[in-house]
Image (cartoon, grey):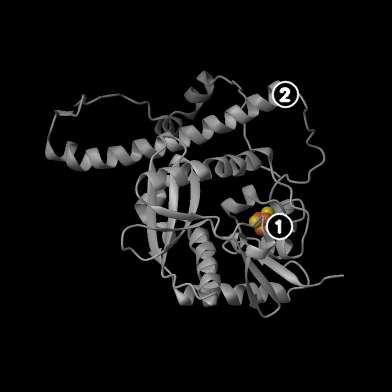
Amino acid sequence: MDNHKVLRASRIGTLCDCALFYSVAGAEEITTEKSQRIFEVGKVLEPVIVSWLRNEGWNVKRNLLDCSNEGMSLSLEVNGGTITAHPDCIISRDDSPLILADIKTMNDRSFRSLKHDGTVKSHPQYADQLTIYAQALRECGHNIEQLAIVALNKNNCEGYIDYFTFEPERYEALKERAQRIFTLDEAPEQGDRFQSWCCGYCGYSHLCELCKKDTAVGDESVPATDNQEVIDAVELLSESRDMEKAAKELSDEAKAVLDREVRKQGIKSLRAGNLVLILNEIKSSRLDTTALKKAHPELVSEFMKQSSSIRYDLKEVA
Ligand code: SF4
């Protein structure tokens, strides 16, 4: 039996040591249909994005190391195992140096945070992935200093390239992490306080003690439905919640600018492009129920009416 341990570079930036351990151990990974669709849509759009890059004048050497071709795979040997790497493409334009790029399709929220904060801060897992790819290429003699995420906003087809540089210290830290994971014989303790967005997308949550403890994952008392209409409705509800959240973030972002640049300047109306913005002061009265309860508790209970409604809560599970 081959005990050689292998870790994919695309995994190395995951926040959770436990998930990395399961990946290296070859444990069964269960992904949701939604996650699979997101992955497949990304793959389908990749050649389209490459053609847009070429139309913009970029030289794109795509699938330089195609993962379907074993002979073309890159790997980094470290203590205890191998990190495999499959870069998307190398791009260049005019006299610019070669740029190692990875193509990512994103939802609006993710895209905006990439533009606002840059890859290293907003998507450190992508910076980690590209750092490993770059090191693997450097060890093959390629002079790669510049890295980039070529991003497409799936909501509005806006494109953006975020550049950052290869950092040897980042590679050393990632190498040490991989080496540490390779030495493990059992899943590491994650600590009860570990709570992360990545649990929601984790394909190993069915194995994870922490996840079983903190969520309803693995609770067999939750029946599964095969009623497609219900499944579609639940997915629709989930999408609408994402949209509500994204809309709230957009609205907050816009209001912060308008508060600063318009309201606080005393401007009452203005024209912005083909839109007119009018500031209307809304005055409203609100019953202070806390104070009322405190001052006249009997009166409040006399007029209190019981009602009930159902709230639909959603939790993503593998
Ligand atoms: S469910 Fe969360 S804590 Fe458990 S392995 Fe996955 S990412 Fe780690």
Quadrant position of residue 187: bottom right
Q: Quadrant of ligand 1?
A: bottom right
Instruction: Give the x, y percent position of residue 193.
Output: 61, 60
Q: How far apart are labels 1 and 2 at the CA level?
A: 31 Å
Query: Which badge, 1 or 2, is on the more N-terminal residue?
Result: 1
Who is closer to the viewer here, 107 or 208? 107
**Rendered residue at 40%/47% (across/down):** 54
Who is closer to the viewer here, 4 or 125? 4
Q: Is mark 1 within 8 Å of ligand 1?
A: yes
Dot 1 falls on a residue whose secondary structure is helix
**Rendered residue at 48%/24% (across/down):** 300
**Rendered residue at 69%/23% (across/down):** 230
Three-letter amino acid code at disc 2? Answer: Gln
Which one is closest to the eye, mark 1 or mark 2? 2
Q: Estimate how packed mark 2 is, as few (under 14), some (14 to 19) or many (20 or more) residues with alpha carbons within 10 Å.
A: few
Q: Residue furthest bottom?
A: 79
Quadrant position of residue 239: top right
Who is closer to the viewer here, 22 or 40? 40
Q: Is residue 177 left or right of residue 257?
A: right
Q: Is residue 276 left or right of residue 55?
A: left
Residue at the spot of label 1? 210
**Rendered residue at 72%/77% (across/down):** 183
Q: Residue furthest left?
A: 266
Residue 292 at least partly seen: yes
Q: Is residue 35 left or right of residue 129?
A: right
Q: Is residue 22 left or right of residue 280?
A: right
Three-letter amino acid code at disc 1? Answer: Leu
Residue at the spot of label 2? 228
Q: Check residue 179 in the rendering and tell me which mark sits there, or answer none.
A: none
